[in-house]
Amino acid sequence: MPDLVLKPTPLQNTATPLVLASGSAIRKQLLHNAGLSCLAEPAALEEDVLKAEGLAQGWAASTTALRLAEAKALALYKPEAFVIGADQMLSCEGVLYNKPETQDAARTQLQALRGKTHILHTAVVVCHKGAVLWQYVSEPKLTMRSFSDTFLDAYLQSEGAECLCSVGAYRLEGPGLQLFEQIEGDYSAILGLPLLPLLEALRTLGVTLS
Ligand SMILES: Nc1nc2c(ncn2[C@@H]2O[C@H](COP(=O)(O)OP(=O)(O)OP(=O)(O)O)[C@@H](O)[C@H]2O)c(=O)[nH]1
């Protein structure tokens, strides 16, 4: 699916606050590292309901990710702010994976993904006063090595619960990089936010370094 880009409506603004509708620490960190300070608050949203609708309707994974990103941003209604919503779906050979809930689930998931290429369908939206101003989808492709169970156990031992914060049970910025033999696509998108297009959209909306 091509990257969706809706040209944002240029607004003359300087003091509109920025809010990230996410509980993802790395997403907040990515924006902070890029020079943007923002409030971060997870959206109260039943993601599973929308994921189930996507499955029932036969939506592409990128469509479900976009709908979830939009729902998170709109659920956290902050009338005076630009609200960023984001979501990632992981697909591998037609199977969708969610964030593993336990180390055992992470082990099983990584055994299913090793030696194969998976896609991280990464969507981001910017909303203002209940309307979507801009949206984007990036779909990096990642190929895992056929690592051994011994390596996998050592990886899980070193990662501990950290790997449960990620849909792929890995942190690419950490030891997760050791799981891969090839990566195609945007690094920040893999971590959870396609930063370059998002920063361009925010500059168009008058949100620059803060
Ligand atoms: N640290 C890290 N996190 C990753 C990586 N790849 C994916 N993720 C995280 O995996 C999570 C994907 O699940 P989502 O449902 O999009 O987001 P979430 O963590 O539930 O947080 P919300 O935005 O509040 O829904 C996000 O938090 C991503 O930042 C990675 O390489 N490193």
Image (cartoon, rainbow, N blue to C red):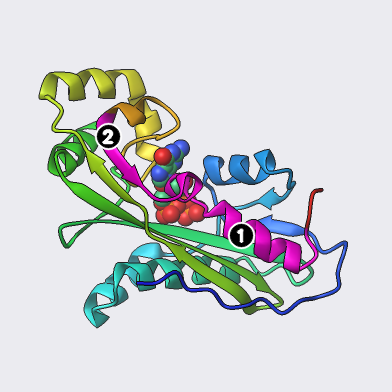
Q: Which segment is the magenta one?
A: 179-207
Residue appearing at x 27%, y 22% in the figure: 155
| 114 in the magenta segment | no
Kindly check if marks 1 and 2 are in contact, taking CB atoms under 8 A apart as contact: no
Dot 2, how many residues are within 10 Å of its Cα: few (below 14), some (14-19), or many (20+)?
A: some
The residue labelled by disc 1 is 198
Dot 1, how many residues are within 10 Å of its Cα: few (below 14), some (14-19), or many (20+)?
A: some
Residue at mark 2: C-beta within 8 A of ligand 1: no
Q: How many marks?
A: 2
Residue at mark 1: C-beta within 8 A of ligand 1: no
Name the one closer to the observer, 16 or 147. 147
Mark 1 or mark 2, which has the lower sequence index? 2
The residue labelled by disc 2 is 180
Q: Position of residue 159 (x, y in %)?
A: 35, 24
Name the one closer to the observer, 69 or 30. 30
Q: Secondary structure at mark 1?
A: helix
As drawn, 180 above or below 53 = above
Q: Position of residue 97 (x, y in %)?
A: 25, 53
Q: What's the CA distance linking mark 1 and mark 2?
A: 26 Å
Q: Position of residue 158 (x, y in %)?
A: 33, 18
The residue type indicated by label 1 comes to: Leu
Q: Position of residue 153 (x, y in %)?
A: 19, 21
Name the one closer to the observer, 165 or 144. 144
Residue 52 falls left or right of residue 190: left
The residue type indicated by label 2 comes to: Phe
Residue appearing at x 71%, y 66% in the figure: 82
